[in-house]
Image (spheres, coloured by chain):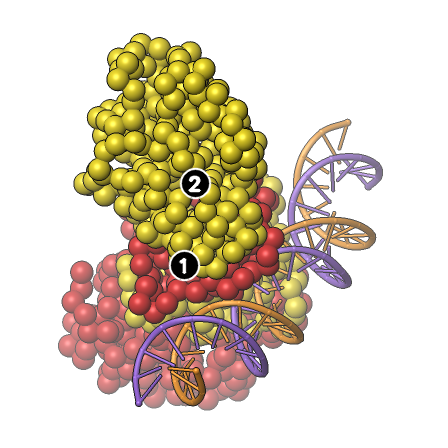
Chain colours: A red, B yellow, C purple, D orange
Amino acid sequence: MTKATDAFPLSEKDRDRRTWEGRLQGASGLCIEDTCDNGGRQQRFSKASAMTQSDEQIEARVAWLYFMEGLTQADIAEKLGMTRLRVNRMLVEARTSGLVSITLNSRFASCAALEQRLVKEFGLKAAIIVPTPQDPGLIPVLLGQATGEYLSSYLAENTIQGLGLGWGATLRETIRNMRAGRYPDLCVNSMMGGLTHGSELNTFETASDLANRLNAECQYLAAPIYAGSPKSRDIILAQDVFRETFERIAANDIAVLSIGDLSERSLLVRYGLPRDVSTEDLRAKGAVGDIMGQFYDENGRLIDHPLNRRAIALPLDDLSRIPTVVLASGGANKTLAVAGALRAKRATVLVCDEDTARKACELVRGEAIA
Amino acid sequence: MTKATDAFPLSEKDRDRRTWEGRLQGASGLCIEDTCDNGGRQQRFSKASAMTQSDEQIEARVAWLYFMEGLTQADIAEKLGMTRLRVNRMLVEARTSGLVSITLNSRFASCAALEQRLVKEFGLKAAIIVPTPQDPGLIPVLLGQATGEYLSSYLAENTIQGLGLGWGATLRETIRNMRAGRYPDLCVNSMMGGLTHGSELNTFETASDLANRLNAECQYLAAPIYAGSPKSRDIILAQDVFRETFERIAANDIAVLSIGDLSERSLLVRYGLPRDVSTEDLRAKGAVGDIMGQFYDENGRLIDHPLNRRAIALPLDDLSRIPTVVLASGGANKTLAVAGALRAKRATVLVCDEDTARKACELVRGEAIA
DNA sequence: ATAGAAGTTATTCAAATGTATTTTTCAGCG
DNA sequence: CGCTGAAAAATACATTTGAATAACTTCTAT
């Protein structure tokens, strides 16, 4: 029967394929005669003859019998008149030398590779990379699906009390893809103020929609994303009702946010920026993206701009105190923003499309954009 | 460390290769977050959602982690929040579906494949196939090496009393490649009469050379390959000395012979055929090759020709009584002869070069010669 | 809503592989 | 020929994978 350690499928039909596949158990008709009545008398290769042509052929034969014919290592040892250890070592050598190679025939293989790379290079808890669709308009949908799946699994396996949320197209799709559940002890809360105009998205409903789907408690952040001035924001946050709200936000177990950029695609840029602040201003200060309405530069550090001090949201630098921070974002326009977030390690979980993640990764490593 | 079940080498250097290789134990930095505090709560896919894109991606991720990153199945189960059984089944499915494929990158791979095929299709105990060299003159050398290696291993692992031998260029090379040994209880004997003229090879020395190398006893067959007539041959074999000799020959444990063809390359054809017998005669009767001086047709059956009754050798049809019959032969000119021998199952062990064996195999199966 | 079928999980055990240690063998050298 | 060092074999044990079975869950059809 097929084993996971087999490299190839087992069916006889598949055996006819050009690239031999699968390791077949119990194969009959072995290559070398199968009687051996003197139990493993020693058979040595002198150093001078090491890896001669016949050695190479024997190794190929061993590899063939193991990977293609599906014999066990003990079977092969008996058949070829050598020790099981020698068979094992030959197989290891076959791998190391490249005599045997394995490929993952899937468009997800490069995503899986990139996931591993991101986790290793940026110390992420997880990276979820989806293939980049031809239609960039599909990216929020795909990222929403992936984030929804991730978050559903996370909630199934973690008992938490506070789930903080941002808003945006990707997060809306995330909520659509959440599996329903029953979490009466969970409080879903907005981690940032909302938009006070614009008809594409009722940002105040984002948290409540998720809370409804999860039968969880909901805590609204009934405030706009920006106050009139830093001073005004401080006055607002000093009110008891907001202080309690922000204590709860700071105590979240997980935050699920997206990354904004400075293009006109951004809801925040189109509807949220105060009239006295332009994207040119922000770019001039080096801004490449925003998280919770707070803009940061290519190194992921907050830019020195009064707008950042007007934001009614958890301060970006306090995000690191939340155990799990999911940043879901993608699209070529977001590359610089994602790279900045990676550099500053703003995320512990990144959900992104492949092309964007790869380019962001390469930016961080100082490589030319391919 | 590298394991035989790994599909790829482990060294970090090798990890940089384009085609990812090797299964790496103890890989750090996993793709999916590695804390899971509620022990495997169920996560089900309904039938309606079976093998969605995300399923496929999860399977690719599992396969990647197992084959490329070297995690154990239990590790992966814990990391991805599923059962070890599910991981195992996904890996099996990955194999069966072709998501994962393995290749043997060796010129010996096709030889190993052909070996298996020959063993299965012709019920051989063993097939040893060597790559066909560009210079056909090298074929006897390579076949001699392979046969010598086989025979040395065979003798190391089997205690036998009688080893019968033919003669020819391939067998001369075989003897050169025998490992020396000490077999005082072994009797090496010629299974066929020798050539009475010709300077290329002293056929009477073949058995004695091998006996010397093996410190074994030697039994000469002091007779020519052909008698003057079938009657004369019967008179010769009726003599006591020959009767005992042939009893011993018939009792051999192993016979090591080569296959002759009807071309001028054949020693027998050039120096051994009686003057009153021509290769045209033999071809007319359907002969395609000879074993022990006895000619057979494309089905491997003895042709009806008086020459076959003049041969001073073990009758070809009696060969099947010897437990192990090694036929070592190769070269394009031998294809028909090898095919005939295969059809009639004259061999239990075949040593041949790849092109010849493949074509012979295809002939037998009724396929067009490529 | 219920029953039956199908699939998955949990658990245990068997088989195969991987590893470590000790012993034996072999090649090279003096 | 003896000695030494390296390599391989033998042996035992640990780990991983594969398989079997019972119980549980989910899905589908009625």
Q: Which residue corresponds to the image point at 39% horizontal and 12% vertical from the top-left?
A: B305
Q: Which residue corresponds to the image point at 51% horizontal and 34% vertical from the top-left?
A: B241
Q: Amino acid at mark 2?
A: Tyr
Please tell me whether residue B152 is drawn above or below residue B242 in the rendered image: below
Residue B69 percent coordinates (x, y)? 43, 65
Chain letter, disc 2 residue: B
Element type where label 1 sits in the image: loop
For the residues carrying marks 2 and 1, which lies nearer the camera in this image?
A: 2
| Label 2 sits on residue | B220
All told, the count of numbered labels is: 2
Chain letter, disc 1 residue: B
Taking depth in this image into account, of B130 and B138 the one nearest to the observer is B138
Taking depth in this image into account, of A92 and A339 the one nearest to the observer is A92
Image quadrant for the N terminus of chain A? top right
Q: Is residue A207 visible?
A: no
Q: Quadrant of residue A364?
A: bottom left
Q: Quadrant of residue B67?
A: bottom left
Which is more N-terminal, label 1 or label 2?
Answer: 1
Residue A170 percent coordinates (x, y)? 40, 58
